[in-house]
Amino acid sequence: MGEKALPRHVAIIMDGNGRWAKKRLLPRAAGHRAGMNRMIGLSEHIFDRGIRYCTLFALSTENLSRPQSELEGLYALFREYFPRNTHTLREKGIVLRVIGDRTLLPADIVKLIAEGESLTAGGTRGVLQLAIGYGGRQDILAAVNAAVRRGREVTMEEFSAMLWTADVPDPDLLIRTGKEVRLSNFLLWQAAYSELYFTDVLFPDFTEKELDRALEAYSRRERRFGKL
Ligand code: IPE
Ligand code: IPE
Ligand code: MG
């Protein structure tokens, strides 16, 4: 056995913020803040470990049906953290990409996203994809409609390039924190052959050590892709 296999792309469904807060008798917003801080620490660690691509599921299309007060809290956190952290990403050479349906988001958030993306566009060290207002079925459907507009049948490669995740390789390792064992409409096409890792640890408690545990589990998996 040589060096341990490291995933090229890690995707994380960051779940459990609300339950983390509840356990501490705190408002849900405190859980989201703790989750935001964890997300920032964790993404640094991921790139420091030599992983080139990271996708983080922050807000699903379905989450947009949560009470307005919860959504406003999430958007406020975004406004507070996003500008500062895009500068850090730029310094570190990480390209930021936001995937999802932007028409579902407030206009000022869309503007911050566009600014963050153009600020970091020159990065060469890695790509951080943030899924906001994202749904896997919506991603596929948008690509299907783009293919229809093209007016001819497309290849698998062409179709992949029409998804919001164009140019980013499929995730090798898909982690979900917070106990649930489901995909909740995340990267349905792209995760066709991802190694799945589910943990009970709630996202604000998902430390670098927990991530290393997931990477260790990944290195022991045998990826066959249907072959013998
Ligand atoms: C995940 O945490 C973050 C978002 C979906 C915004 P939750 O808010 O789903 O936390 P739980 O599942 O209620 O604990
Ligand atoms: C999945 O978490 C979406 C994100 C983590 C952004 P949810 O908490 O929305 O998932 P369900 O509703 O339990 O499936
Ligand atoms: Mg949840």
Image: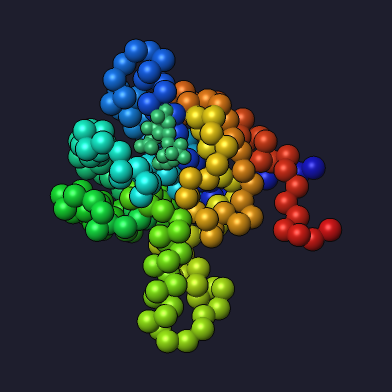
Residue positioned most to the top: 25
Q: Quadrant of residue 121?
A: bottom left
Residue at the spot 37% in from the left edge and 55% down from the top edge: 99
Left or right? Give the position of 7 relative to 132: right
Is residue 153 in sight in this rendering? Answer: yes
Given residues 105 and 67, the one toward you in this image is 67
**In the picture shown, does residue 109 fall above or below 38?**
below
**In the picture shown, does residue 118 fall above or below 55?**
below
**In the picture shown, does residue 226 fall above or below 47?**
below
Residue at the spot 44% in from the left edge and 29% down from the top edge: 16
Residue at the spot 48% in from the left edge and 45% down from the top edge: 184
Q: How is the image coloured?
A: rainbow
Residue at the spot 42% in from the left edge and 80% down from the top edge: 148
Q: Position of residue 96 (x, y in %)?
A: 35, 52
Given residues 40 and 162, the one toward you in this image is 162
Q: Quadrant of the N terminus?
A: top right
Q: Quadrant of residue 33?
A: top left
Q: Position of residue 197 (x, y in %)?
A: 61, 38
Is residue 4 in sight in this rendering? Answer: no
Q: Quadrant of residue 86?
A: top left
Q: Position of residue 115 (x, y in %)?
A: 21, 54
- Give the quadrant of ligand 2: top left
Left or right? Give the position of 15 relative to 10: left
